Image (spheres, coloured by chain):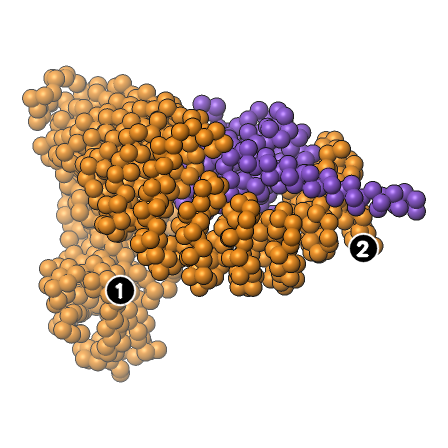
Amino acid sequence: MNPFSSGTRLRDMIRAIRACKTAAEERAVVRKECAAIRAAINENDQDYRHRNLAKLMFIHMLGYPTHFGQMECLKLIASAGFPEKRIGYLGLMLLLDERQEVLMLVTNSLKQDLNHSNQYIVGLALCALGNICSAEMARDLAPEVERLLQFRDPNVRKKAALCSIRIIKKVPDLAENFINPASSLLKEKHHGVLITGVQLCMDLCKVSSEALEYVRKKCIEGLVKTLRDIANSPYSPEYDIAGITDPFLHIRLLKLLRILGQGDADASDCMNDILAQVATKTESKKNAGNAILYECVETIMSIEDNGGLRVLAINILGRFLSNRDNNIRYVALNMLMKAIVVDAQAVQRHRATILECVKDSDASIRKRALELVYLLVNESNVKPLTKELIEYLEVSDQEFKGDLTAKICSLVEKFSPEKIWYIDQMLKVLSEAGNFVKDEVWHALIVVISNASDLHGYTVRALYRAFQTSTEQESLVRVAVWCIGEYGDMLVNNVGMLDIEEPITVTESDTVDAVEVAIKRHTLDLTTKAMALIALLKLSSRFPSCSERIKDIIVQNKRSLMLELQQRSIEFNCILQKHQNIRSALLERMPVLDEATFSGRRAGSLHTAISTSTGAPHNLQNGIAKPAAAPIADLLDLSSDDAAAPSSSGGDFLMDLLGVDLSPASAPSGTSQPPKAGTDVLLDLLSIGTSPPAQSSSSASDILSSSQDNKAPLANLNGLASLSSLPANATSPASPVPMMDLLDGLGPIPQKHEENGPAYPSLVAYESSSLRMTFNFSKQPGNPQMTLIQATFTNLSPNVYNDFLFQAAVPKFLQLHLDPASSNTLPASGNGSITQNLKVTNSQQGKKSLVMRIRIAYKMNNKDVLEEGQINNFPRDL
Amino acid sequence: MIKAVMVMNTQGKPRLAKFYEYLPVEKQQELIRRVFAVLCGRAENVSNFIEAESIFGPDSRLVYKHFATLYFVFVFDSSENELAVLDLIQVFVETLDKCFKNVCELDIVFNYSKIHTILDEIIFGGQVLETSSAEVMKAVEEISKLEAASNAITLIPKSASGWRSR
């Protein structure tokens, strides 16, 4: 009979559970068994107690509740027989949770068993204590465990050593009691005890600096000698793994040496020789040998600097990288990732091998290697590395392309030495894996293209070529149609030809063909098609000869099932048919997009998203949004859901100003747009032409006052296009650009921007030694109660302020609205400023004047600074 | 420190679960399920390491080995050497093999408590206790003998009296 099986019934239960075909059957069997066990517990059945507990442990492993068996464990532990105690202690370790009151009950039994005459019972008690010991038990039982460290039998000694680790982890104060017995364990000959002794010393050094000093002084030479002995020792079969003598002991010793050598030059000196010996002599054919080398490398990298050893260590990792075993390559990459902080130069030497690992067949190795390559890239090697990565992109797995693309794009953006290289690389990525490129990446590309005026022609030709070969890559098509729309004429006329280019002959109608392909290809999504439609519209003014054909394509799309395309086509058709006079102005090339503000916006997008969700204006973070910063998506009017989007207040402005809303009947004939859909700027522009031109100034001012912002119309153009998904009410500190510019072609528009009421002198509202805040006031005509205040903050100190936040409070008769600030970083010494718009509505205007309490918080040198003040000196009649 | 040792079969059924940091039983089951979900999707010719931080929290590593119908999974923190743990799994499996003469899944199922005893002789409270399978075998055999002896002494009169009374 197998002495471990407690009678047949445990086997029967396991068989019954195994015979179950469904989870429900299994639950039923377990429920029945549990009921029987509970009944036995209630009857206080002693004969089958340990068999029942064995069953409960099995049930526990399957994931069923077994708390009712906890007291049975305690009873079994207290009983005299060895089998009962064994099962009792097993149950204690598996079933009991950390409820102290139950554990307290077991302390006494443990104490007795630790003093038991049978060493195996002592072993059971130690094992249980090592697994579940609480701080209180640690205090109570530490003397017993300490005594057992000198027990005659090595099996008990090694268990006592590991149990001591648990005790000092629970109660670090007890560490000093263990220092002496632990260091005497280091002189043991028995390998098992030696491993546990080294482990105990390691944990002692971690919790107690006293122990660390002691071991450093007294034991280091002994440890080095032990390591030398086992490294040189002849074959000892018991602890041999794959021909290496006790790799585990090797590793433990190396770990302890690492702790001792860290931050101590003398100790590090002591171990240099043996580390060099282990690093050079260890057999590296098998896993066990590599495990030792790996540990040795980590120790060399962690102890005080020794240049020669480090090079040796990194070379070992380099060798690992070409090992055939996946595991070895994997750990080598992990370690190199750490080593790069210590010695980037040495790691760079293995660049080629690391790059090979990016192409590994094992996905986790590929991922690691890619991360490592990413860390290795700098200005000097970005070109060859990117080239390699892009070449690999062509053949890599689909699943890996996402990661790879993101990393390449990020590298190219970060380290690109020149614009043409950046554009070239991005085009390659777009053609290979355009579907994996994130929106912000190709937005950034468009910003760069727009800024590189000498490369416009080159880029559009390159994009045209790429587009001919890969029409399935969404973001490539988007960038291509955008560029063709903007710079189509350069494509046809070969403007700005570079020496490296091959000449290309593209006719106007070829160009239109390309864009038409984008509209017709059904695999491309709505945004792309909408962009293509805009490109066509733009081309219609660049290529007069093709304008009839373009019109046809646009007319075809008037029947599109996609509302967005349909709407655009109708609008564009109107432009082409009825508004020749404004067309060329309207379809001008886009102004150069501002890179700095785009990247600021990109960085700040998270910020603004947070602040809009918090809601209350007082809590608004300083959003970073300037009108020019509107991402190009806005300018392009890309978003495809504008019909559904509610019009933002900023969006209303232009529309209100033009009176569209007031005269829906005069909306362009033939379009069945409901007036609400007027968020689209083009529609607004269209309605200008047809709406009654004469508008009394009073109604105009009414409209003006009803709009909430007095913004530059151009800013609103952004706002209009940007659709509510983006913070459309970005404030504009810029002076109003007369909207006449935009509408120049429209003779009949009469009204001029009215002067914004009487002028008020600006006011230094707050000034301290570090900060000045000035207020500029303006009124909206027709709404005398409301005052618009533009606050300008200037930094008077030589330090940059971060996380700048302005808050204001007003008494009840005033209403305050704070717009997001232009930035949350205030450059030092007045080199720039933050502006923020406030709107104050004074319900007692004329009777009471404005008053405001302010609070300004910011971080200077990472220290929080708070300034507060009250402003009483507002002009009287605000 | 080793955080957990799990053995599960290729259907995801747990065959041994030992956690060295306390976790409620529901959490244990969830972890076993999540580990299995990752394991069963792994190809044969890949490394034995898995990114475990998403499952077990920060500073955790996972090494597994696949033998016939069983996965042996060790979870541990950065203080252990991954390659050494791989060898430790080997020691554990070799010991089981010696104890059961060609161990198979059924041996582990039916000798649940013995498996625990063997494991307790190799890993103790999350630390490596013994790495020589011969030493482990010696200790386990001693315990078996003791168990058999106690059964012979205590159980026979008890069960005899039990038989008479029933």
Residue at x-position 14% and y-position 34%? A380
- Name the residue at 15% across, 41% down: A591
Q: Residue at x 27, y 49 (%)?
A: A267
Q: Secondary structure at mark 2?
A: loop
Camera sees residue A353:
yes
Q: Chain of mark 1?
A: A
Q: Within 10 angstroms of label 1, few (less than 14), some, or many (20 or more) residues?
A: many
How crowded pointer 2 is (Cα within 10 Å; few <14, some 14-19, many 20+) is rated as few
Q: Which residue is the site of mark 1?
A: A805
Looking at the image, residue A127 lies above or below residue A769: above
* A503 or A798: nearer the viewer: A798
Kind of residue at badge 2: Asn
Whichever of labels 2 and 1 marks the residue nearer the N terminus, that label is 2
Give the vertical position of A778 relative to A563 (above or below). below
Foreground residue, A622 or A495?
A622
From the image, state the color of chain A.
orange
- Mark 1: amino acid: Leu
The hue used for chain B is purple
The structure residue drawn at horizontal position 23% and vertical position 38%, both measured from the top left corner, is: A310
Query: Residue A81 at what x, y percent from top left?
Result: 73, 49
User: In this figure, which residue is indicated by the disc labeled 2?
Assistant: A44
